[in-house]
Image (cartoon, helix red, strand yellow):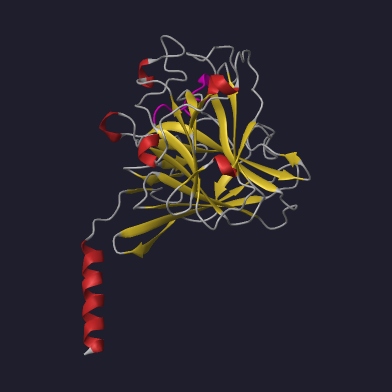
Amino acid sequence: MRSVLAILACALASRACAGAPDPAWLRPSDASGEPRWGLSNGIAFAIHPAPVGRPEGPAGAARGTGGPRGLIRVGYPILAGGAHALVNFIAIEPVVGGRRAFSELEKSDSDGQPGKIIEAIGPATIGREAAGVQRLVVPLRVESFRNGARVCLNVSMRSDHPDELRIAADADHGSAPIEQCILTATMGNLARARRLWLSDGFVECQTLYPGHTGDTFAPHTVFPIGQLLREQDGSALVAITTDEADPASIFPFPGTRRWHYPGPPVTQYWRKEQGCFRDDLAAVVNARATYWATQQPIPGGPAFENFEFTEKFRGGSPLIFGITRRTPQELGYPNRPIRN
């Protein structure tokens, strides 16, 4: 009787699994296809030379190429009809012997041009996690850095978490000892993110960097683990948002779509799951008053540019980057400003 029940339960589970609609995964059609992956109803990500969506790049020279090299391009369906548009870039910045490398800025050994080459080192795989849930896995490798770091990345998404990109960095064969491997969202200026959300509420960019002007980066500001929101499952969370109700209505370079953010407000966040971090975890931001590589002031004043978690390197420990239409309040943040 027990075996009959087991067989029946297995059959019912298989039927439920078979009856669930397959997620609409985005991936290259063959080995020569554009290196772009993700979900049609969630995050899409790409590496050079593939654009992740529209617009193809924030800076004039980068248009048509999806943006600078040496970055993971991250998009979200913020356009009319659910089309993807670029929202942010993620750079890989390993630290060896106290020297921080920069995947976007460091020159490639292949051609001497800025931007380390990121390549897929195998085909994307899609596995079934549970009834109706699938996981996409894309293995990537970053070209060797001048400080001796060699980094490989396991990038994955779950069909039941379309708003989240999971990235696990590890030391590749022959790497120098890595002290930190910082994954930084480098383009908060596109959405003009001016609010940083912590456990007690939000802090304004202007509060952290009063009077900041010019075309340089404001200094990094560090927020230790005690200031990060802790979710019910124990995850640590930090988020950024714009302070504008309609960011798409602003065209920073009038008459063009250069640096134009084309969609509604979204919440961008970094998340570390319970058991995947220790007390050294911290959130870090900096800011700019002008758009990168221009003298053009950011409308409304300085905005956060780099946005990241830092911690001691633990190879294979996953870090989650999210983009969602949910508000910070829906994520559990109190809606109040943090005063100095």
Give the image location of residue 86, x and y in percent. Answer: 43, 31
Residues shaded magenta: 54-66
Is 250 positioned to the left or the right of 108 in the image? left
Of residues 304 and 231, which is closer to you in this image? 231
Which quadrant would residue 130 be assigned to in this image? bottom left
Q: Which residue is found at the position 66% from the left and 26% from the top?
A: 219
In the rendered image, the vertical position of residue 42 relative to residue 62, given as above or below:
below
In the rendered image, the vertical position of residue 275 relative to residue 239, given as above or below:
below
**181 in magenta:** no
Give the image location of residue 133, x and y in percent. Answer: 33, 59
Give the image location of residue 43, x and y in percent. Answer: 39, 42
**55 in magenta:** yes
Q: Which residue is found at the position 30% from the left and 49% from the top?
A: 24
Q: How many marks?
A: 0
- Quadrant that contains the N terminus: bottom left
Of residues 181 and 210, which is closer to you in this image? 210
Is 221 positioned to the left or the right of 84 in the image? right
Answer yes or no: is residue 234 visible: yes
In the rendered image, the vertical position of residue 98 relative to residue 306, given as above or below:
below
Q: Main secondary structure of the magenta part?
A: loop
- Quadrant that contains the C terminus: top right
Answer yes or no: is residue 52 visible: no
Give the image location of residue 163, x and y in percent. Answer: 38, 44
Of residues 2 and 174, which is closer to you in this image? 2
Which quadrant would residue 132 be assigned to in this image? bottom left
Residue most extreme to the bottom: 1
Residue most extreme to the top: 254
In the rendered image, the vertical position of residue 143 relative to residue 17, given as above or below:
above
Residue most extreme to the right: 97
